[in-house]
Image (cartoon, helix red, strand yellow):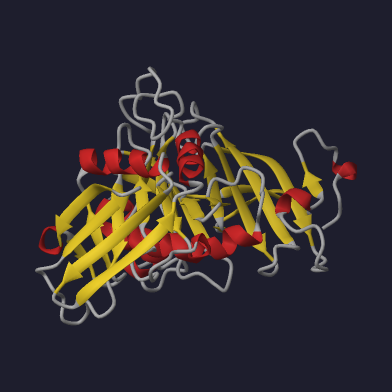
């Protein structure tokens, strides 16, 4: 699950960088000093040290990554890169140490860590230790990451500038600012008992009524585990119903198609996305590059004419939590057909439909 999440985030950065400030863009990417911050539609967020941060003493261990889900009081997890030459031998007798401004904040035997060979990283899952370490790093200047073992000694020194701002961004994005479970600037407000959104990582999370459709090789939207691994699939409790956004097969160069399921418990049915066309009010079976705004209960879709993001079609829907059927209501469409290198990002494309627009006011596609 953790490996798949990292792969999906890295793949999705291509889309986000093409759409720097799209309306209701729930998948977020920020570069804050030397840290890359990315969050998916299920509000799982990563803070990753980038090469721009400038590690000294060798960058072998510098590319650490923190991750936290939106769940109340969710623990932090940490990934630390393998030292050079760790694979294929894998020296289980080595140790990893992290010092913050000269003081040891974390130390562990490699044998006690989770190996993520596909990513070449060690996974650390010690909630209380990691929370204390993170806060020390967020308030520090420099950190040194060391490995000592049979394959040698390696260390990297990293600059911590910007880490506290990255943490504040995640706290705000996940709705933790001012709460007792915030990373930074902890407040007195208690977290909720639960959240209404969750990621879909595997077939095991799908009810039989959905599997019957997505597992059929002859289906237009045939989806296997590899497609779920590539996409940002998620579900949201919309009140009287639950919505699931699943990939509709593999992604293209810069467009990932999605299908919608609506239901409750184990009974779900394939649903459509409200749309306005030249023929009037219609629906779409599939949309692309979906993004979800948990706070405002908004869903958006952007079909890119090309990767630059200067042309395409964008839809925006609100979620009606009292609706017993399809909870999506169309609120806005934007479109730009000329791929001319200007008006990059759907928020800069012309509006072609709003509910209050008369038919003769709509901009021609």
Estimate the x, y position of residue 77 in percent, counting from the top left: 28, 49
Seen at 35% across and 64% down, the residue is 156
Q: Quadrant of the C terminus?
A: bottom right
Q: Quadrant of the N terminus?
A: bottom left
Estimate the x, y position of residue 337 in percent, counting from the top left: 80, 64
**Up-down relation of residue 91 to residue 229 (above or below):** below
222 vs 62, nearest the viewer: 62
| Total numbered circles | 0
Estimate the x, y position of residue 341 in percent, counting from the top left: 80, 67
Residue 255 lies in quadrant: bottom right
Seen at 45% across and 68% down, the residue is 249
Q: Is residue 214 visible?
A: no
Residue 16 lies in quadrant: bottom right
**Up-down relation of residue 255 to residue 131 (above or below):** below
Relative horizontal placement of residue 295, taking residue 236 as reference (left or right): right
185 vs 158, nearest the viewer: 158
Seen at 34% across and 40% down, the residue is 136
202 vs 267, nearest the viewer: 202
Q: Is residue 11 visible?
A: yes
**Up-down relation of residue 54 to residue 261 (above or below):** below
| Residue at the farthest front position | 102
Seen at 29% across and 71% down, the residue is 120
Estimate the x, y position of residue 134 in percent, counting from the top left: 34, 43
| Residue at the farthest top position | 188
């Amino acid at each position: 699950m953790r490996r798949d999440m990292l792969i999906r985030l890295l793949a999705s950065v291509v889309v986000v960088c093409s759409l720097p400030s799209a309306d209701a863009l729930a998948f977020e990417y920020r570069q804050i000093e030397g840290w890359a911050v990315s969050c998916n539609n299920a509000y799982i967020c990563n803070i990753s040290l980038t090469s721009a941060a400038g590690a000294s003493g060798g960058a072998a261990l510098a590319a650490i990554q923190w991750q936290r889900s939106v769940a109340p009081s969710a623990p932090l997890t940490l990934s630390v890169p393998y030292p050079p030459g760790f694979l294929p031998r894998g020296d289980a007798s080595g140790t990893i140490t992290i010092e913050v401004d000269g003081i040891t904040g974390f130390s562990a035997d490699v044998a006690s860590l989770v190996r993520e060979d596909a990513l070449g990283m060690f996974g650390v899952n010690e909630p209380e230790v990691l929370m204390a370490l993170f806060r020390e790093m967020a308030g520090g200047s420099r950190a040194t990451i060391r490995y000592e073992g049979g394959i040698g000694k390696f260390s990297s020194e990293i600059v911590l500038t910007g880490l506290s701002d990255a943490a504040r961004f995640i706290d705000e994005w996940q709705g933790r600012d001012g709460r007792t479970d915030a990373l930074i600037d902890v407040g007195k407000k208690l977290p909720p008992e639960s959240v209404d959104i969750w990621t879909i990582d595997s077939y095991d999370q799908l009810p039989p009524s959905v599997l019957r459709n997505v597992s059929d090789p002859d289906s237009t939207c045939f989806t296997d585990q590899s497609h779920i691994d590539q996409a940002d699939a998620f579900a949201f409790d919309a009140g009287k119903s639950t919505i699931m956004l699943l990939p509709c097969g593999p992604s293209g160069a810069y467009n990932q198609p999605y299908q919608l399921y609506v239901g409750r418990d184990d009974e779900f049915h394939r649903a459509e996305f409200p749309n306005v066309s030249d023929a009037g009010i219609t629906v779409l079976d599939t949309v692309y590059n979906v993004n979800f705004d948990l706070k405002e209960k908004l869903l958006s879709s952007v079909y890119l004419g090309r990767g630059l993001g200067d042309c395409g079609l964008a839809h925006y829907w609100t979620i009606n939590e009292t609706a017993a059927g399809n909870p999506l209501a169309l609120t806005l469409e934007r479109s730009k057909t000329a791929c001319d290198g200007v008006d990059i990002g759907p928020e800069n494309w012309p509006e072609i439909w709003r509910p209050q627009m008369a038919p003769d006011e709509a901009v021609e596609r």
